[in-house]
Image: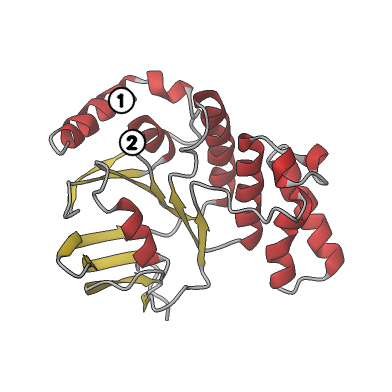
Amino acid sequence: MENSNRPKLEIRDLKVEYYTKTQTTVALEKVQLSVADGEFVSVVGPSGCGKSTLLKVVSGLLQPAEGAAYIDGQMVQGVPDQVGMVFQNDALLPWKTAFDNVRLPLEIKGLPRDEQIREAERLLKMVGLEGFRDYHPKQLSGGMRKRVALARTFAYDPDIYLMDEPFGPLDAQTRVKIGEEFLKIWEKVGKSVLFITHDIEEAIALSDRVIVMSARPGRIKAEFKINLKRPRPFYDIRFDPVFKELQREIWNQMSNEI
């Protein structure tokens, strides 16, 4: 019988090392972290603390020196099928249109073509790009490409989303717009998310919990439960007194590590 209390993602006693001919660098050490089914967890910390390294372990792209990551109780060995990655760059296929980029995961899953078309059209509409289905990535703005990348990830429909500063390259206004759209979509989908960001406000606005990492070697230094009601407005929530207090406390934890 499946254990309903088991975390969707669990990281146990994780240690990651990088090697050169002359030295060994410990990137992560003694990391313990869990993400419940449907929980949105953000990780913040100083540059070089191992945030992206953490995602590489969970996605099966990096083998740890010690410990392991587990999805639904199964140790991650190789790239797991349940994971969907969203990177800083959109990683779209430049020779495919927005529509075909979104349709690709549906084709790989073997859905009938008419169902692929309906779902790809629905997802493009969901991210506000129904009028741009035949555009190639080079014809789209950075914000539009990011929306296509998000729609493609939703098409893949993973059990857990791993997001490595996905809005980082965007300008401030576009970043708020895309973050707002993503939050609305996620609140409907309700999947687990492990979200890497250097932006404290973004982390609080999106998350159920925010994890603060120490300077290298990265460890979990503190965690904060985000007791703000959902659905929540991605931008206006920043004026809430509870938000302001969380921002201050998280910044205090981070500033000691810089």
Query: Could you tell me if the residues under marks 1 and 2 are in contact, i.e. CB atoms within 8 Å?
Result: yes
Quadrant where the C terminus sits is top left
Vertical arrangement, residue 256 with respect to residue 101, above or below: above
Q: Position of residue 24 (x, y in %)?
A: 16, 66
Q: Position of residue 38 (x, y in %)?
A: 46, 55
Residue drawn at x 37%, y 59% as measured from the top left: 55
Q: Position of residue 69 (x, y in %)?
A: 32, 70
Q: Amino acid at mark 2?
A: Asn
Residue 87 relative to residue 204: left or right = right
Residue receiving disc 1:
242
Residue drawn at x 54%, y 24% as measured from the top left: 173
Residue drawn at x 67%, y 56% as measured from the top left: 93
Which badge, 1 or 2, is on the more N-terminal residue? Answer: 2
The dot on residue 227 is: 2
- Nearer to me, 73 or 95: 95
- Nearer to me, 2 or 167: 167
Vertical arrangement, residue 210 with respect to residue 240, above or below: below
Place residue 244 in its image quadrant.
Answer: top left
Q: How is the image coloured?
A: secondary structure
Q: Amino acid at mark 1?
A: Val
Residue located farthest toward the front when viewing the structure as drawn: 21
Crowdedness near tag 2: few (<14), some (14–19) or many (≥20) residues, C-alpha within 10 Å: few
Place residue 16 in its image quadrant.
Answer: bottom left
The dot on residue 198 is: none
Q: Position of residue 63 (x, y in %)?
A: 32, 73
Q: Secondary structure at mark 2?
A: loop
